[in-house]
Amino acid sequence: MRTARSVRSCALVVGVLCVTGSAFADVINVPGDHSTIQGAIGAATGGDEIVVAPGVYPERIDLLGKDVVVRSSGGASVTTIDASGLGSLGPVVRCDSGETSACVVEGFTVTGGSAPNGAGMLIADGASPTVRACVFEFNTATGQPASQGGGGIGVINGGSPLIERCVIAHNSAGLGGGVLGITNGAAPTLIGCLIYDNDAVFGGGVASEVSAVVTMVNCTVAENRATSIAPGVCTFQAMTSMTNCIVAGHPVDVVNLSGSTTTARFCLIGTGWAGQANLEGAPGFVDPTGPAWDFRLVEGAQAIDAGNSLLVQGATLDLDGGARVVDDPGKVDTGAGGPPVVDMGAFERTAAPVCPADWNGDGFLNDQDFFDWANDFFGGAGPQGTADFNGDEFENDQDWFDYVNAFFNPPAACG
C-alpha cells in the first residue's frame, strides 16, 4: 500500500517538476553556448533570453517567429551585427513570422544590409517586435522608389512594432531612407529615436505610405536628404502622428501628399507646421553637421521644456539614457503637463550634477554614499538600471570604475 502511494507520489513530483521546469526560461550566451546569434535563436524557445558578448558578428539573423529576448551585454557601441561581407542580398535582422512585443532586440549596431525592403531590419506580415537601444547605420534598401524601401528599418504589410531609443543614420533607399511604414495598416511607433543623415528619392528621414500609420513621440528627425521630394518626413495615402518631436534641417521638413493626414502637436518643425503648441525655426542643436552630428540642445534652446509631459507614452529615459522629463531651471516652461515639462526631441537637456558621487543626494559626499552605491550595484533594493552610473543603459564594471573615480576624485563643488 505504501509502495503504491509512493510510486504515485513520485510520479506526481516528477510530473510537477517537468511542467514547472518547462515554464522557466533559459539564458543562452553567445559565443559561450553558441558561436553565432542565429545558432542561439535556432536553439531557443519562447521566453528564452539570448545574451550576446561584445564583438562583431558577421551574419544575418532571423527571429523565426520566436518571442525571445536577444540583447547585447555591452551595448550597441561595442556589439555589431555586420552583414556587409556576406555577398548576397537580405536584411540584417528579419522579423516576419508573427513575432509579438515579447520578441525583443536590444543593444546592437546593425549595419551592412542590402535588401529591397528593410535593409537594416525588416519587420513584415504583422510582426510586432520591440526594438530598443540599437543603431541602424550604413544599410541600403535596393527596391523600387515608388513602393519599396526602408534603408534603416522597413515595416511592411501590417504589424505594430515599438522602436525606442534607437539611432537610424547614414542609410539609403528609394523610399524612406531611415524608416518606412507601408501597406495594410503597418503601424510602427517610434519613441525617443534620432533619425539623421539618411538619403532617399522620396522621404529621406521617415516615409509613411499607403495605409500605414506611423507614430513618433520625442523623436528628432534632422539633416536627411531626398533627390525628389520630402527629405524629412513624407506621408502619402497614409497617416503620420508626431508629438514632442523635432523635425529640422531640411529645405521642407514635412510633406503631406494626396489622401494623407499628418498631425503634429508640441513639436518644433523648422519650416513650420500647424498644430497645438508647435514651434518653428532653429531648434538649437549643439552641432548638427558631420562629423559631430550632435543633436542635443544648447542652453536656452526654444525646444527645452516645450513639450507635453503627459504625452511621453510612458518613456522614462531619453536617448542618452538619462531621465526623460527634467526641468531646466534656466528656461521658462512653454509646454504643458508639468512641472517638470519635457523637452522636444530625443534628448533631454539636464544640468550636470554638482557632485555626481553624492549617491543619496543629501548634499554631502561621505562613506554612506559609497555604501548606498555598492548596495545598488550589487543588487540591493533598486531595480535593474539603478546603478547605471555612466548612463549607457548597462550596469557593468565600467560603472564601478566610473563611480569609484568620481568618489575619490570629486570636483571642488562637492565640499
Image: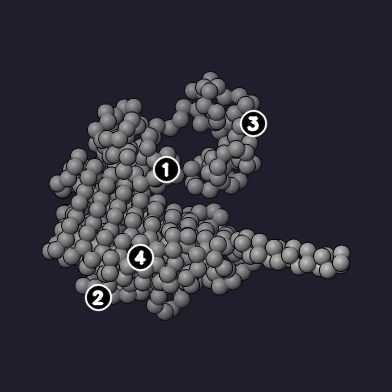
Amino acid type, residue under disc 2 in the picture: Gln
* Image point (26%, 69%), residue name: 183
Residue corresponding to mark 1: 316
Compared to residue 411, the image places residue 186 above or below, namely below
Point out the tag, 2 or 1, that comes first from the N-terminus.
Answer: 2
Is residue 15 rendered to the left or right of residue 141? right
Tell me the residue that label 2 is attached to.
144
Q: Earlier in the sequence, mark 4 or mark 3?
A: 4
Q: Which residue is mark 4?
A: 159
Residue at image coords 23%, 66%: 211
Disc 1 marks a residue whose amino acid type is Thr
Say which residue label 3 marks: 371
Q: With respect to residue 403, does 269 lie above or below?
A: below
Q: Position of residue 7 (x, y in %)?
A: 81, 68
Secondary structure of residue under mark 2: loop
- Nearer-N-terminus badge (1/4): 4
- Distance from Cα at disc 1 to Cα at disc 4: 24 Å
Q: What is the C-alpha distance between the residues marked 2 and 1?
A: 38 Å
- Please say whether residue 345 is visible from this viewpoint: no
